[in-house]
Amino acid sequence: MSDAPRHGPETQARACLAIILAAGEGTRMRSDLAKPLHRIGGRPMVSHVIAAVLAAGAGRIAVVVGPDREDVGAEARRAAPGASIHVQRERLGTAHAVLAARDALADAPDDVVVAFADTPLVTAATFDALRAALGRGASVAVLGFEPADPAGYGRILTEAGRVVAIREEKEASAAERAVGLCNAGLMAIRGDRALALLESVGNANGRGEYYLTDVVAAAAGAGEGVALVTASPDEVLGVNDRAQLAAAEAALQARLRRDDMRDGATLIAPDTVFLSADTRLGRDVVVEPNVVFGPGVVVEARATIRAFSHLEGATVGEGAIVGPFARLRPGTRLGPDVHVGNFVEVKNSTLERGVKANHLAYLGDATVGAATNVGAGTITCNYDGAFKHRTTIGRDAFIGTNASLVAPVTIGDRAYVGSGSVITDDVPAEALAIGRGRQVVKPGWATTSRPRKPT
Ligand code: UD1
Ligand code: MG
């Protein structure tokens, strides 16, 4: 899957520091949330980038955040607990941002990779290709792409097939603007040259900005090699506003669906299935149309997720059937061959092998033993207004329809609960519990007592 290690033999023996620039202003998002924390595939953008560089073999991660953005640093540490966080106090450009992580750079690794938190779709394989170019002797490796409309991007300038500079659009001549090969932004720099190259980037023409892209001319001018790696426009899509966030989501979904199908899951209508970056679908899993996978879902081999189901934080065992119209909430563990049917909600509950809850039920904070049948309309009353309580049901038990199980409560192995019961006391193994008003039958009542309109 996308987070699998991708570093090849060329880069395996090389140490790598990844510097992730996450100090963007993000004003066009019109959001109280920092741009790197906006999610695609259920995961913050900064964490996508961290996952990719980790998979490409980065042993150290440095994240550059804006002032007062502890939240971005905290998310980065969730994704990579050892990450160092650096604050860029003034926003003086991409080279200036990289130099905010000077402490990390000083202790030079073999490769330095610079990535942008707002360019979340770059794959581990691409980061690895940038690193491999350094391994072959380049001082700098840049990532180029050919967008339909190059306006706004830096242009990669070549002479006799060699990369000599990157020119930002606002400083480019008309001839340079005609170049279609654009800079995706991120790059790799040899560790023992990184600090010197970055420090050589001046503010000479008074732009008030230090451009990371200027390390290219600095290296080429010193006779050092600059390598070019290329990517598809989709992979280097940058997110500056909500429309681009949606475009990145769409591109990521397409990739996740493709990966899952490649790995042996059937998606009957792939465009209608929404996956999270960490969704794991086993071999021969079948997903019907219109299913949403929130974060933290694992579906084991041969299970079927039927139409219009919503899953989050749940494990579905081998051969289980979920839905249509089922909702699995965090903490759900379904064993092998469990059936959870239409309009059944399960939360923080374990259903062991072969349990059936096929219609209209709520199972919250419950443990249900193997082969137990949970009738239609069964509700675990798990909340007393202040605290949550557990319901424990044994193996091979039978819970009649429309039962209310008032937790905390335990129902033993092979016990029966009569339909419509409100169960407030424990039920021993093998017992039948009935908790409802007795039925009363009044023969002939309608003849004598039925209300009638006067004739
Ligand atoms: C950059 C490249 C450009 C490339 C484009 C691709 C430079 C000088 N230009 O331009 O060649 O075509 O990306 O999208 O690098 N950041 C900071 N601190 C800063 C400035 C930027 O952390 O002071 C971060 C931003 O949050 C962002 C990244 O660096 O993640 C890129 O910055 P941005 O301002 O978007 O650069 P572009 O002008 O798009
Ligand atoms: Mg940008």
Image (tube, rainbow, N blue to C red):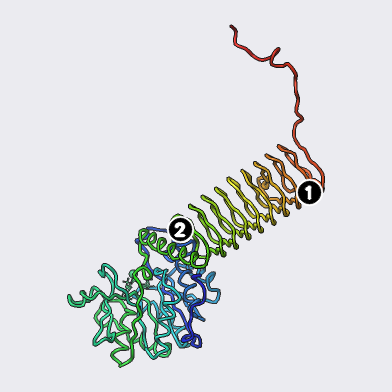
Quarter of the picture for ligand 1? bottom left
- In the rendered view, would you say 395 is above or below 450? below
Amino acid carrying mark 1 in the image: Arg
- In the rendered view, would you say 417 is above or below 103? above
353 or 108: which is nearer to us?
353
- In the rendered view, would you say 51 is above or below 433? below
In the image, what residue occupies the spot 46% across and 69% down?
Answer: 46
User: Hey, which residue is sitting farthest top in the picture?
Assistant: 455
Q: Is residue 240 left or right of residue 180?
A: right
Of the numbered discs 2 and 1, the one sitting upstream in the chain is 2
Q: Mark 2 points at which residue?
A: 270
Q: Mark 1 points at which residue?
A: 414
306 or 407: which is nearer to us?
306
User: Hey, which residue is sitting farthest bottom in the picture?
Assistant: 223
Q: Are marks 2 and 1 in contact (CB under 8 Å)?
A: no
In the image, what residue occupies the spot 47% across and 57% down?
Answer: 274
CA gap, disc 2 and disc 1:
42 Å
In the image, what residue occupies the spot 34% across and 61% down?
Answer: 28
Q: At which x and y percent is residue 200?
A: 33, 87
Assess disc 1: are there few (<14), some (14-19) or many (≥20) residues with their C-alpha within 10 Å of its C-alpha: many
In the image, what residue occupies the spot 60% across and 11% down?
Answer: 453
Q: Is residue 428 left or right of residue 212?
A: right
Q: In this view, does 150 lie to the left or right of 35?
A: left
Label 1 beta carbon less than 8 Å to ligand 1: no
Q: Is mark 2 on a helix, strand or loop?
A: helix
Q: What element carries label 1?
A: loop
- Total marks placed: 2
Instruction: Please tell me in which quadrant of the rendered image residue 114 appears.
Output: bottom left
